[in-house]
Amino acid sequence: MHKGDSQALLEAILTDKEKRVRIQEELLKLYGAPVIAFTVNIPGPSKKTPEGAEIHDIGVKAISAALDLSGIQILGQRLEEGAAGRVAFFSAAAPPIALKQQAIAIEEAHPLGRLFDIDILTEVGISVSREALGYKPRGCLICSSIPAVICRRSQSHSLQALNEKIRLMLNCYKAENSML
Ligand SMILES: [Zn+2]
């Protein structure tokens, strides 16, 4: 990647983050309820990939279905697409801890859950962490028993290997759910 390009991409991602914070604040003010912010974990500098968008769609459906099943009302919903990929926001009428437990259940049980990043913000905008609820940090995509942060820091896997794994997971999921 050209140096100027990566600088431009970085700036676009920063603007995205500011936009994300603005939407979150808007929803918090509008509904006074916790906010679910859902993104897909795509490694590498370009987050806007066709696989990422497909996985995001599948995740949005999984989250909506889980909230519906639990009888949790969705007060408002927003979808934002930027340089960092897609973000879906849900204002949900439930306590933040209950929402985080739901989020972790989806991240652990859904076949693509390892790729989902489901953040929960309290009514006052504080993020609820997995660790705060006594859960272990998330495992690496390839060697699942090792925390992802360790493999990332030591750059254990090439971007190509990670993207290949993501494609494989998505294709398996689509084949099993007759989406191919
Ligand atoms: Zn690893």
Image: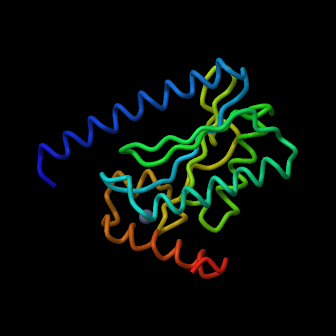
Considering the image in quadrants, where does the C terminus appear? bottom right
Q: Quadrant of residue 160?
A: bottom left
Q: Is residue 111 left or right of residue 140?
A: right
Q: Please name the colour scheme applied to the rendered image.
A: rainbow
User: Whereabouts is ligand 1, in terms of quadrant?
Assistant: bottom left
Residue closer to the observer: 101 or 88: 88
Choose top left, top right, bottom left or bottom right for residue 133: top right
Q: Nearer the viewer, residue 171 or 154?
A: 171
On the image, the x and y values in percent for residue 6 come to 20, 45
> Where does residue 169 sit, x and y in percent of width and height?
53, 73
State the residue at coordinates (79%, 32%): 93
- Quadrant where the N terminus lies? bottom left
**From the viewer's perspective, is 14 left or right of 81?**
left
Horizontal placement of 39 versus 60: left or right?
A: left
Q: Position of residue 126 (x, y in %)?
A: 61, 25
Instruction: Count the numbered circles shown.
Output: 0
Which residue is farthest right?
Answer: 71
Residue 37 sits in quarter: top right
Report the residue at 59% width, 76% height from top: 174
